[in-house]
Image (tube, rainbow, N blue to C red):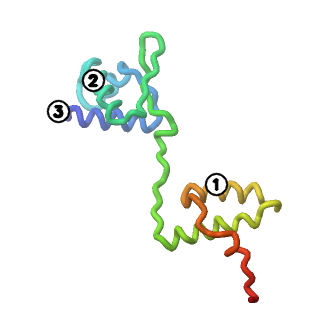
Amino acid sequence: MPGQPHRLLYMYRKFLEGEVLTSGQLQDMVSEEIEIVSRRTIQRDLRLLQKLDPSLVGVEKGREIFWSIPRDYRYPKQVVRFDTNELLAFHFLKAHLKTFRGTVIEKDVERLYKKIEKLAPYEVVLDETIYWDQNV
């Protein structure tokens, strides 16, 4: 018998795939795919799964509770790692994007700036260093 860990992973995978399911539907699916279980067992598993991942929500409609994980929580943001030099390059790029204000690509640059701001927050480059005279 596979047991609770197998059931939890199976149900969690279904929710991550975007399915909205009731305990009755889960009982049928788990009984067919893994092992025969009672609805009460599925309900206990759902409560445990909700403790493990609070993004699992149950919406009551009539006498049924429909369980799902909202789309925003199913697709986590990609974690990207930068070394120090790359992060510094992001800050310089962000500082130089200001020179495109008032141009035809201003809106595109503003969207790019917001994305870079999430990766490299705050200002670390002074405006004076951007516009320094290279002929001196």
The CA distance from mark 2 to mark 1 is: 43 Å
Q: Position of residue 135 (x, y in %)?
A: 76, 88
The CA distance from mark 2 to mark 3 is: 18 Å
Q: Position of residue 97 (x, y in %)?
A: 70, 65
Amino acid type at circle 2 is Arg
Q: Which of the numbered marks, if any, corresponds to residue 1? A: 3
Q: Of label 2 and label 3, which has the lower sequence position?
A: 3
Residue to which mark 2 is pinned: 44
Residue lying at 56% horizontally and 58% vertically, measured from the top left: 121
Amino acid type at circle 1 is Lys
Residue lying at 23% horizontally and 24% vertically, measured from the top left: 36
Cβ atoms under marks 2 and 3 closer than 8 Å: no
Binning the other alpha carbons within 10 Å of mark 3 as few (below 14), some (14 to 19) or many (20 upward) gives few
For residue 26, what is the image quadrant?
Answer: top left
Residue 18 placement, left or right of 32:
right
Residue to which mark 1 is pinned: 114
For residue 93, what is the image quadrant?
Answer: bottom right
The CA distance from mark 1 to mark 3 is: 51 Å
Tell me the quadrant of the picture where the N terminus can be found. Answer: top left
The one nearer the camera, 89 or 45, is 89
